[in-house]
Image: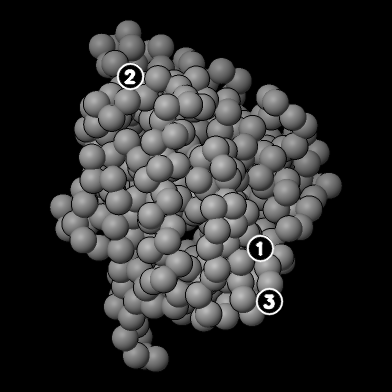
């Protein structure tokens, strides 16, 4: 990472951490309401004695509960750290406040063109002053976009590399109020009933226990607060015509539970280690309704289909070449989230995504009372 941007992130985090200790943070191990003791090198819970280190270089607090230190979560950290370094490490070293601002404008434009969760379900023009939590910020682009819109932004990721990258981007944002913590979405280190919006794009289905993640989302939302989430769809071209055939042909389907074999054949290959993607879950409409049963459903929407969603080698390259020949250009907004410009969906692909897309775009609401009614189709 760029030393100058790391130092900027560290300096901005210090007073924010102090403020969050007073207003937001709780011990993720024992959930005591006592204020944690803060020093330059750690936060310490006065009730259970658990110490949470603060990185001297980056100012990042490692708020991982004792129960979060499992072999499964270690594999999650190893895999997603590997993929982070594959996608983002090089171009992030040259980021400046000006270049990031320009890239965020391009990113928002791309999200609108793709009819992405971050543009359609996330109320970008209404975020100013709202307390927003992002679970699993990837390289930090979404969190930085929301911060640039005036959100009081908090991001958490279990993977240190992703927390550092997100913290750097948030520090470069003109709004400058965002912060990132290393934490486990199954044991969030936050007060109950705190956030106006919890956002997570394609992350919760990669956890060890997605049901527990949803319980935590519900806990930290204010009554009446909304979760804006994306999880993968079972009944999609990607699952039936790509993932399932690959699971069959590789034999992984016969060796592992579903979430693990799907994980091993999706999201790419390790480059800097040997750990494969540990978990990926997919959801039918019935499974999805069960997953969000504690919430009132505002909307479900399917999206994300491309003509490379089939188990055919080098089909992505073929699709992109054909579209380039037809005059389409890869969108520069892809660099922040995919590590390179992105060939956005055609109008036909967007339309087909409504029916056979891989993304469930979800808006759910924490009820203000114990009663709620589902309104989604």
Residue 347, visible in the rendered structure = no
CA gap, disc 1 and disc 2: 46 Å
Give the residue at x 30% y 63%: 131
In which quadrant is the C terminus drawn? bottom left
Q: Is mark 3 on a helix, strand or loop?
A: loop
> Can you name the residue that lies furthest to the top here?
325
Q: Report which residue position mark 3 lands on.
A: 48
Does residue 256 lie above or below 373 as drawn? Answer: above
Residue 93, visible in the rendered structure = yes
CA gap, disc 2 and disc 3: 52 Å
Q: Report which residue position mark 2 lands on.
A: 330
Along the line of sight, the residue nearer the viewer: 153 or 12: 12
Q: Report which residue position mark 1 lands on.
A: 51
Q: Is mark 1 on a helix, strand or loop?
A: strand
Along the line of sight, the residue nearer the viewer: 121 or 45: 45
Q: Which of marks 2 and 3 is nearer the N terminus?
A: 3
Percent coordinates x, y for residue 354 in the rendering? 34, 48
- Left or right of 242 on screen, residue 248: right
Give the residue at x 47% y 15%: 318
Along the line of sight, the residue nearer the viewer: 211 or 15: 15
Give the residue at x 55% y 38%: 57
Q: Nearer the viewer, mark 1 or mark 2?
A: 1
Q: What element carries label 2?
A: loop
> Can you name the residue that lies furthest to the bottom here?
370
Q: Which of marks 1 and 2 is nearer the N terminus?
A: 1
Percent coordinates x, y for residue 211 in the rendering? 58, 69
Does residue 275 lie above or below 377 as drawn? Answer: above
Percent coordinates x, y for residue 62 in the rendering? 59, 54
Label 1 packing within 10 angstroms: few (<14), some (14-19), many (20+): many
Percent coordinates x, y for residue 152 in the rendering? 29, 57
Contact, CB < 8 Å: mark 2 with mark 3?
no
């Amino acid at each position: 990472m760029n030393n100058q941007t790391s130092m900027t992130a560290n300096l901005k985090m210090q007073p924010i951490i102090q403020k969050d200790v007073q207003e937001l943070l709780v011990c993720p191990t024992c959930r005591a309401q006592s204020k944690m003791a803060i020093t330059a090198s750690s936060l310490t819970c006065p009730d259970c004695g658990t110490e949470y280190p603060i990185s001297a270089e980056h100012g990042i607090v490692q708020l991982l509960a004792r129960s979060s230190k499992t072999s499964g979560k270690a594999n999650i950290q190893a895999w997603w750290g590997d993929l982070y370094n594959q996608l983002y490490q090089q171009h992030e070293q040259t980021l400046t406040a000006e270049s990031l601002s320009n890239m965020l404008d391009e990113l928002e434009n791309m999200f609108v063109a793709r009819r992405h969760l971050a543009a359609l379900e996330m109320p970008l023009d209404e975020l100013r002053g709202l307390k927003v939590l992002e679970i699993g910020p990837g390289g930090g682009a979404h969190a930085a976009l929301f911060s640039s819109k005036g959100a009081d932004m908090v991001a958490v990721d279990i993977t240190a590399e992703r927390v550092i990258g997100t913290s750097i981007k948030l520090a470069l944002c003109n709004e400058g109020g965002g912060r990132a913590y290393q934490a486990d979405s199954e044991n969030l280190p936050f007060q109950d009933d705190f956030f106006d919006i919890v956002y997570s794009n394609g992350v919760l289905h990669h956890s060890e226990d997605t049901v527990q993640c949803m319980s935590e989302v519900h806990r930290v939302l204010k009554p009446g607060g909304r979760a804006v989430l994306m999880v993968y769809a079972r009944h999609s071209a990607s699952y039936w015509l790509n993932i399932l055939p690959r699971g069959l042909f590789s034999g992984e389907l016969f060796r592992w539970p579903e979430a693990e074999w799907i994980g091993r054949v999706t999201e790419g290959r390790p480059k800097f280690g040997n750990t494969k993607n540990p978990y990926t879950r997919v959801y039918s409409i019935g499974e999805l309704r069960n997953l969000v049963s504690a919430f009132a459903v505002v909307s479900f929407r399917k999206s994300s289909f491309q003509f490379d969603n089939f188990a055919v080698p080098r089909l992505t390259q073929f699709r992109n070449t054909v579209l380039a020949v037809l005059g389409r250009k890869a969108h520069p907004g892809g660099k922040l989230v995919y590590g390179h410009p992105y060939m956005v969906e055609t109008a036909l692909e967007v339309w087909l995504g409504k029916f056979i897309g891989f993304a469930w775009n979800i808006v759910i609401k924490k009820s203000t009372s114990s009663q709620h009614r589902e309104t989604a189709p």
